[in-house]
Image (cartoon, rainbow, N blue to C red):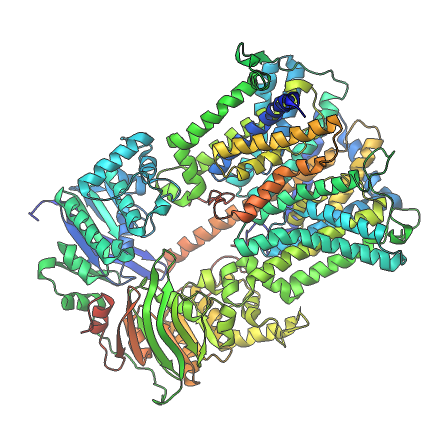
Amino acid sequence: MNWQLRTRAAGLNVLIPLVAVVLALATVALLLVAVGSNPLDAYRDMWNAALGDRFALSTTVTKTMPRLLAALGIALALRAGLWNIGAEGQLYVGALATTAVALYAPDLGAPFLITAALVAGALAGAGWALIPGVLRATRGVSEVITSLMLVYIGIQLTNYVLEGPWSQPGSTFPSSPYVPTGASLPVIVGGTLLNAGALVGLALVALAWFLMSHSTFGLRLNAIGGNERAARVAGVRVSLMIVLAMAASGAFAGLAGGMEVLGVRGRLVEGFSPGYGFEAIAIALLGRLNAFGILGAALLFGALDAGSAGLQTAAQGVPASISQVAEGLAVAYVLVGLGLASIIQRRRAARAALRAAAEQPASGEPDVLPIPTESVVDS
Amino acid sequence: MTENPPLVRLEGVTKAYPGVVANDNVTLDLRAGEIHALLGENGAGKTTLMGTLYGLHRPDAGRIVVEGRPVSIHGPRDALALGIGYMQQHFSLIPTLTVAENVVLSLRGAATKLSVQGGNARVRELAAKYGLDVDPTALVEQLSVGQQQRAELLKALARNTRILLLDEPSAVLTPQESEQLGLVLRKLAGSGVGIFLVSHKFSEVLGIGDRISVLRRGRLVGTLDAAKASRAALAEMMVGELRSVDKRPAATMRQDAPPRLEVSDLWVPSERGGFAVQGVDFVVRAGEVLGVAGVEGNGQVELTEALAGVRRAGRGTIRIDRQSLKGGRPRRARRLGVTHIPADRHRSGLVATMSIEDNLVLPVADQSPYSVLRVLKRRAIRKLARRLIGEFDIRTPTPSVLAGALSGGNQQKLILARELSRLPSVIVACYPTRGLDFGATESVQQAILARRDEGAAIVYVSVDLDELLSLSDRIIVLHQGTLQGELSAAVATPEQLGLLMGGAAAA
Amino acid sequence: MNSHFFAQLLVATVALATPLLLAALGELISETAGVINIELEGMMLCGAFAAVWAAHGSGSVVVGFLAAAAGGLFLAAIHGILCLFFRANQVVSGIVLNIFALGLTSFLLATALGPTTSPVATLHSLRVPMLADLPGVGKAFFDQNVVVYAAYLMIPCVWLLLNRSPLGLALKAAGERPAAAESLGVRVTLTRWLALSICGVLAGLGGGLLALAAIGFFTENMTAGRGFISLAAVIFGRWRTTGTAAAVVLFAAADGFQIRLQALGIVHIAPQFLVMLPYLVTLVALAGLMRRMRPPSALGVNYLSS
C-alpha cells in the first residue's frame, strides 16, 4: 500500500499533520496580510465563531459530522488500497434515499422512522459504491475514475428529483418538502444546534476503529492493501473483500448525507454539500487513516468551516473561502512532510546498507535490518 | 577466429554483495567476430558480469579494457557510447509503440537521430541485412516473444553495436526460433561484432559458440574452444564435484505408503503465452521428498503455483489425497492441506507492511481462538506469535515488528511458521533456502523434514544440487517445462543432473 | 426544432466546446506521459481568475490570456512539486488542489478583485470573410474569436506531436513503461514535467477563454465542473487526439442541447440527464469496453529513478 497513507511511528503520525496545520495557518496569515487584513483579528473572529461559546461549538460539531462519517468510510476502503473518490456522490444518493423514506414511509414515530431513513441512506450509499467496487473486483477497472463519474451522475440524479417530482413551487431554490418531525434528529443540547447525529457520529468512530484494528475484516483489508497477491496466496477472498470494503465505505458516506438531511436542514436542498465527500479524502489523509486521527482532522475542518462562516458575518472583509485555502494548504504540507520523511528514510537505509556491506563483506545478514523496526514509513 | 587483439577484456573483475561474492576475480576476453558463450547455473555470476560490462554496477576490483584502452563505465550511457549493447531477459521495449518507433526512441540524443519515417526505412534495411524478419510498423505488444527479441536486436544494431551482450536469449524461444537466432548471431559475428552469450543450455553453447567459459559460484572454472568441448566435460565444470554430503536421516518410508500428491499430464500456462509446464507426471507418497532440479526459469515456479492452487492449470489433473484440485483457488488447496512456500517471498509470501503476528495469523484469523464473531482476540494472536517465533527461531525483538523489516532468512522462517504450523498433507516449497545463511538454511530444512516424518509429501524445488541430493528421496529434472528424468537420489550424481538440466537426454 | 434551432445549437456547441477542448487536449498530453490531473478543474479556475485579474489591471485581453496560462501553470507546478518531487499520490494531490484553487480564487475575488469591479474587455469575434456566410455552419465555425480558431489548429498540432514526433514517442514511453523508457535514454521525470506544464498552460487558457470570451467577469466556481468533463473526454476518447476532440464536441453538444431546450421551455427531456451524459457514457464505456479502454499503463504511478 502506498507509504503515504500510513506511517507507523506514532510520533510522526501526529507531528506531521500538526506541523502542517500550523504552517498552513501561518501561510494564510501571510495571505491575509498581503490583501490588507489583520490575521490576528481574522483568527480571533474565527475562533469565536467556531469555539467561542456553546452555540459555536455546536456549529462546529454539526459541520464536522458529514466530513467525519465520509472520511471514516474512505479510510476503511483505503486500508485495502481502494480509493473511494466517489464519496460525494454516495453522500447525495444517501441523502436522496433518506429523504424519500422519511417523506413516504408510514410515520411510525421518531426512533423507527429515523432509523429506517438512515438505514436507507446507508444502503443507498453502499449500493452507489458497489458499482465501482464490482467493476474493480471483476474487471480490474480503476475505482478512481468510475467512482468519480458516479459523483456527478449522483448529483444530477438528485437535482432531477428536486427540480422535478419534489419541486416546491414558489421556493427560491430547489428543495424537497420538509421531512416530518418524526424523522428529525432531535437537538440534544438546548439552545444549540447539536443534534443526536453527533452521538451517532461518535458511535461510528468507535465502529470504524473497531473494524479497522480489531476485526478479521480489517485484518484482511490491511493484507490486501499491503500486498494483494500475498493476501490471495494466504487464502483471503480478495474479490469479495474489495466489494465489501467499497460497500462499507459507501454506507458511511450515504449515512453522512442522510444525517445532513435529518439533523441539520430537515429537507434535501440542491447543492447542500460544499464538497464534503472530497474534503473527506483530505481528512482521511490528515488523520493518517486512524479513526481518532480522523476525528481530530474532521473537527479541525469543521471548526474552519464554522469559523469562516463567522468571518463572513463579522463583515471583516475576509471571505469564508479562506478556510478552503487553509484546508488545501494543510494537506499539501502533509504531503510534503510525508515525502520528506520518505526521502530521509530511503537515504538512511541506503547508507546503512552500504555500511553493512563494508563492515561484513561475506558473513550472514543481520537478523533485523538496520532500519527502525517500527518502520517510519511503510515500504 | 584469427588472433585479433581482444575487443573487450575483463581483468580480475570482482563484485561482492552483502553475504555473497557474485564475481570473484574473473578474467575473460572477447575477440572481434567471436561468439563467446558463458555457461553456468543461476547464481554463478554470469548476469552480474554482464551488468558490470554494461555499467549497471561498478566492480569492487578489476578493470575493463576495450580495444586496448582501459575504460571506466559509469552507466549504460557510457557503455552505449563504447558500442556495447545489452539484450537483457526483460526487454526494454515500449509495448504500445511500433518496432520502428522504439528504435527511433532509443536513438533520440544519439549522433544518428532518426525521424519516425526514417525509422521504418532503417529498420527494414537492417532487417534485410541480417535476416531478421520483423515488420517495423508492427506494435511490439502484438509480436511474439521471438519477434520482440528480434526487435531488441534491431535496436542494438541500429546503434552500431560492436560488442553485443545477450542474456539467456533462447530462454523464451521455440527451438526453431533459437536456430534462426543462431543464424543471425553468426552473421553478426561474421561482420566483426563480438558477442557474449550467456546460457545454461549445452546445445546452444556448443552449437553457436566459438569459445565457452564456465562460471561457478562467482569463479571462472575454465575456458574451452567449443570444438574441443563435450557435454560431459561442461557438466562437470558447471556443477562441480559431489561434495561429501550428510544424507539426512531418511524416514522409514514404506513402499506402500499412500500417494498424497498425484500429478498427471499437467500443463500450466505461462504469462508470456504458451505453456511453462508441459505434460508433467509424477507421484509423491506420504513421508517422501521429491526434489525438483533445473535451472531457474524452466517452469518450476509455475509448477509449484499450480500445485498450490495459486495458478490455474491448463490441462491435466492434480490430486491431493485422491481429491482433485483444478482451478486457481488457493483456498481450496489450503483446505485440502497443501502448504505453499512461494519462490518470491516478497511478492507472494508475506505482507511486508503488516506485523509479524498479523502475517502469522492471516490464514486462520477467522478460526477460534484467534477471533470470536469477527472480533480479533489479540491475546490469543500474541500467544500464537510467540509460540511460532520460538518454535521456528525467528529472530525479532517483538512480534509487532513489520515483516518487511526482517532479514531474508527470518522472513522465510516466518512464512514457514505460518504454513507449517498446521498439519499439511503436501508441502510445495520453491527455493525455500534461497539467499539464506547456513543457520537459517538448517532451520528451514529441519522444519520441512520434520513434517515429512509426520507423513507429509514434499515437493522441494531448488537450484542447489547438493541440497537436493541430501534431502530428496527421488529427484526429477525440469527443462523448458518438460520432465527430463526421474532419478533416485541415492544413486544420482551431479553430473547426471547437470546433463539433464542442460537439456541433454538422460544418460 | 428547425434548422434555425440547429444552427443556434451549433454556435452554442462551438462556444461551449472550446474551453473544454483546450483543457482536454492538455490533459491528454499529460496523461500520455503518465500524470493524471484531477485538479484540471482547479487549473481552469485559476486561469479564469488570473485572466480577469490581469485584464482588469492592464486593460488588455492579450495580457489577460498570458496571465491565464500562468494561472494554470501555477497550479500545475504545485502538482508537479508534490507528485514528481515529493512522490505524493497524484489523485490525492489533485483533489486537494481543487479545494485549494476554489478557495484561493474565491478569496482573491472577494479581497483583491472585488464584486463591484466592472467587466473587463472581452474578445471580439473575427469573421472569416467567405466561410462565415456558409449556411448553417458558417456562423458557428467561422465567426468566432481568435482563441477558438487557435483551438481548431490545436487539434492537428497535438495529433502531430503525439503521433509523429520523437517527443511524442518519449511522452508515450514515459507513460507506458517508465523503467524501460529510462533505459532507452528518456528522462522520465523531465518529460513528465514538460507534459504537466503544457497541460497547465492549456487548461489555464481554457479557463481564461471562459471568462474573457463573452462575460468579462469572474464568479466563484465559474468553471462549474468543466474540468471533470474534460477529464471524462480524455477517457471516453480513449486517450487519442481524435477521440478526445470528438468526445468534447459530443459533450458540448449535449450541454448546448440542454440549454436550448430549457430556453425554449421544452420539458419532456429532463435537462439533468443531458448534463450527466458525459459522465454516464464514460462510465458505461469503462464498464463495458475495458479491454479496448487502455489507459497508459503507468498513469498515476509515480516513477522513482534510482
Look at the picture and state if B281 lies above or below C20. Answer: below
Point 61% across, 35% down: residue: C229
Look at the picture and state if C47 lies above or below A217. Answer: above
Q: Position of residue B249 (x, y in %)?
A: 34, 85
Examine the rendering and report whether any part of residue B393 can be seen: no
Along the horizontal axis of the image, is A253 left or right of B331? right
Total tally of numbered discs in the picture: 0
Q: Position of residue B336 (x, y in %)?
A: 49, 77
Q: Quadrant of the N terminus of chain A?
A: bottom right
Question: Which is more toward the observer, B30 or B423?
Answer: B423
Q: Which of the 4 image quarters holds residue B275? A: bottom left
Q: Which of the 4 image quarters holds residue A34? A: top right
Look at the picture and state if A114 lies above or below C72. Answer: below
Look at the picture and state if B277 lies above or below A163. Answer: below
Along the horizontal axis of the image, is B338 left or right of B487? right
Q: Residue furthest top?
A: C129
Question: Which is more toward the observer, C292 or C93?
Answer: C292
Q: Residue furthest left?
A: B2
Along the horizontal axis of the image, is C107 left or right of B208? right
Q: Which of the 4 image quarters holds residue B154? A: top left
Point 36% across, 88% down: residue: B253
Q: Residue furthest right?
A: A190
Q: Position of residue C281 (x, y in %)?
A: 59, 41
Examine the rendering and report whether any part of residue B260 can be seen: yes
Question: Which is more toward the observer, A275 or A4?
Answer: A275
